[in-house]
Image (cartoon, rainbow, N blue to C red):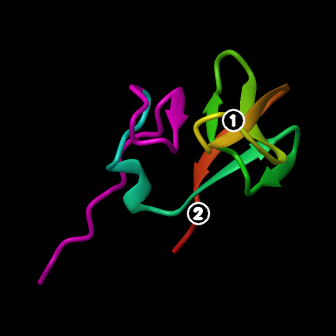
Amino acid sequence: MTQPHDPPALPDRLSVDPRSPHHVAEVFQHDIGIRFNGKERFDVDEYCVSEGWVKVPAGKTLDRKGRPLLITLKGTVEAFYKPA
């Protein structure tokens, strides 16, 4: 029998981009959610709970390297694991 392992603690700052120093691959093995100003957001690329900001894509705009252009929104950030 296999024991279900507990997910790792969510970091204060997390990025979806694997090139970022704030990317933690173990966290993405579980389904996580971000609540920003009381509403769940599904388009967050990076967040910081202690500083109170999230980075989201600015529409379909791309930077010169072909990645989405990100804007920073400030507010109350809450990260959580979604139930299975």
Residue sitting at the far front: 64
- Residue at 47% across, 39% down: 10
What is the x, y in percent for residue 28?
A: 43, 55
Quick one: 35 or 46, which is closer to the camera?
A: 46
Name, please, the residue furthest toward the top. 51
Q: CB under 8 Å between callouts 1 and 2?
A: no
Closer to the camera in the image, 43 or 13:
43
Q: Which residue is mark 1?
A: 63
Q: Which residue is mark 2?
A: 82
63 is higher (above) or lower (below) than 83: above
Q: Amino acid at mark 1?
A: Asp
Viewer-side label of 1, 2: 1
Residue 74 in percent (x, y) is at 84, 23
Q: Is residue 77 above or below residue 40?
A: above
- Image location (x, y in percent) of residue 2: 15, 78
Q: From mark 1 to mark 2, how far is it between C-alphas?
A: 31 Å
Q: State which quadrant residue 40 falls in.
A: bottom right
Magenta-tinted stretch: 1-21
Q: Is residue 8 magenta?
A: yes
Label 2: how many Cα within 10 Å (few below 14, some 14–19, many 20+):
few
- In the rendered image, the quadrant that contains the N terminus is bottom left
Q: Is residue 38 left or right of residue 14?
A: right
Residue 4 drawn above or below residue 34:
below
Q: Residue 18 location, x and y as percent? A: 40, 42
Q: Residue at x 64, y 18 (%)?
A: 50
- Specify whether residue 64 is painted magenta: no
Name which residue type carries label 2.
Answer: Lys
Task: Examine the rendered structure and indicate whether residue 15 appears above or below residue 52.
Answer: below
